[in-house]
Every structure is written in C-alpha cells, then in structure tokens.
Amino acid sequence: MKLDYDVQHLPGSLRDWNRLVIAVSEAPDDTVETFYLERKSPIDLSSPDGKFAVAKAILAFANRDPEVVAPFFDGRALIVIGVDKGTVAGMRRIEDHQLVAALKPYLGDDEESPRWKAERHRVDDQNDVLIIVVDAPRPGDPIFTLRQQFNKHLAGKVFTRSSTESVQADHRAMQMLMRRLLARHKDFEVTVALGAEDIRRYTWDPKVLEPLLEAERRRYLRQLPSREPADPNRT
C-alpha cells in the first residue's frame, strides 16, 4: 500500500512530522512497510526482546545500498514505534540517554556503529510516538554488524533491508556491502578564487619574478604575425 505522504524528503517541521505519523497510522495493514519505513506497535524497551527488535531494524536500514535508497526520505529510513492500524497510542516516554543505553549492547557507540537519532510525536503526558531516523548510507561505510548475541542471533551477524522486513544478508547483499565499503570518492577538484580586495600585502623575489616575465614576453612575441623584410628598391 502506498503511504499518503510525500516520501521524497524527510519531514522538515513539527506539522510535517505529525502528518507523517497520521499517514503511517492510517495504513490498514503492514504493506505500508518497505525498505525505508517500518511501523511498530508499542514496544517495551526495558525488555531484551524490545531492545533487540529496534536494534535489528536499525542495523538492517544502515546496511542498505546508497544509490537505491537515495530517492526516499533523502536516503534515510524511519522506524515509527507506537502506532498501529488506525491508532496512535504511542509508547512510554523514554529519554535519549535511556534509548542509547538500551541499544548500545547491540549497536555499539563508535565509528563502526550505525548513525541514527530519535524524533518524537507527543501523544499525552506520558506517551510519545518514537521515530528512529536512521541516517542515509554512504559510500565507504563499514558493514554494520550485531555486537552482542541475542538468542540464536550470534554477534557479528549482518542484517539488511531488502523489502518489507529486516533479514540476514545473503550473498548478494554482502557483495553490495563490500562494494559500498570499498567505494571512495576517487577524485575531486578545488578551485580557489582570490579577489583583489582580499589582498592586503604581498612581496616577491626579483630572481623569481623577472624570468617569469621574460618567458611571458617571449611567448607573446612568438604569437605576433611575422613582418616581411623591407624592400630596399621600393620608393
């Protein structure tokens, strides 16, 4: 099912976030979920099951192909927690430091960890819709792995998001992630322009400047049209 919201860009205002939450909640089934959006009913983030469910989704969204996901939410992915079919119940409010602590065992908190942040849609004095925004994948990103074992899922496992669910990466996904890891911006150019008004003081060495001026003079003379020698018999 197509989401009743323009998914090209990430919401830029509180009003836009509210519209997105309503659109996600109004979807009658889970077909609204895709490789850039996951909808979850309220989760207990104090439980191991709840922590792992969110961490797994973050890892999967972080391990996507940058080119494929670029047209949606500016490459980002959203995990909207606390909405269900036709309801916006929210979940028990959780502070950022509590959220980071809950997910850290599975995600880590270093350069090899996924990049994400939390947005919130207030429901009442105690409950929010929690929106995890997973940053857009970039060429050169590491392969993000599960840091701590959970039940049958061993540390080092790789999840990705192929379509509507977070799954273990198969050989095709691993090849894509290895290409992403090895990708770098090969070349770049820098152009520096300096206006005369920016110059306050300068010096030069005649030993360097005079040969340059002489070389330029000779180059200019070589470009001039040649002149025919004067005819001594002409009057």
Image: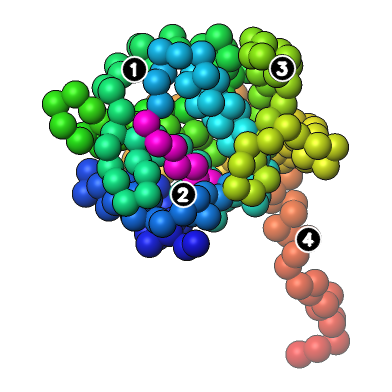
Whole-angstrom CA distance, mark 1 to mark 2, is 22 Å
Q: Look at the numbered disc 2 and give the secondary structure of its residue.
A: helix
Q: Read off the residue under disc 1.
A: 96
Whole-angstrom CA distance, mark 4 to mark 2, is 59 Å
Point out the tag, 1 or 2, that comes first from the N-terminus.
2
Image depth: mark 4 or mark 3 in front: 3
Q: Read off the residue under disc 2.
A: 73
Q: Look at the numbered disc 3 and give the secondary structure of its residue.
A: loop
Magenta span contains residue 38: yes
- Residue 127 on image: x %, y %: 23, 28
Whole-angstrom CA distance, mark 4 to mark 1, is 72 Å
Q: Give the range drawn in magenta.
A: 36-42
Q: Read off the residue under disc 3.
A: 152
- Marks 3/2 in contact by CB < 8 Å: the verdict is no
Q: Read off the residue under disc 4.
A: 222
Image depth: mark 1 or mark 3 in front: 3
- Amino acid type at mark 3: Lys
Q: In this view, does 5 lie above or below 114?
A: below
Point out the tag, 4 or 1, that comes first from the N-terminus.
1
- Amino acid type at mark 1: Asp
Q: What kind of colouring is applied to the model shown?
A: rainbow
Image depth: mark 4 or mark 1 in front: 1
Point out the tag, 4 or 2, that comes first from the N-terminus.
2
- Residue 94 on image: x %, y %: 30, 19
Point out the tag, 3 or 2, that comes first from the N-terminus.
2
Whole-angstrom CA distance, mark 1 to mark 3, is 28 Å
Whole-angstrom CA distance, mark 4 to mark 3, is 80 Å
- For image coordinates 20% across by 35% down, the residue present is 123
Q: Look at the numbered disc 1 and give the secondary structure of its residue.
A: helix
- Marks 4/3 in contact by CB < 8 Å: the verdict is no
Quadrant into which the C terminus falls: bottom right
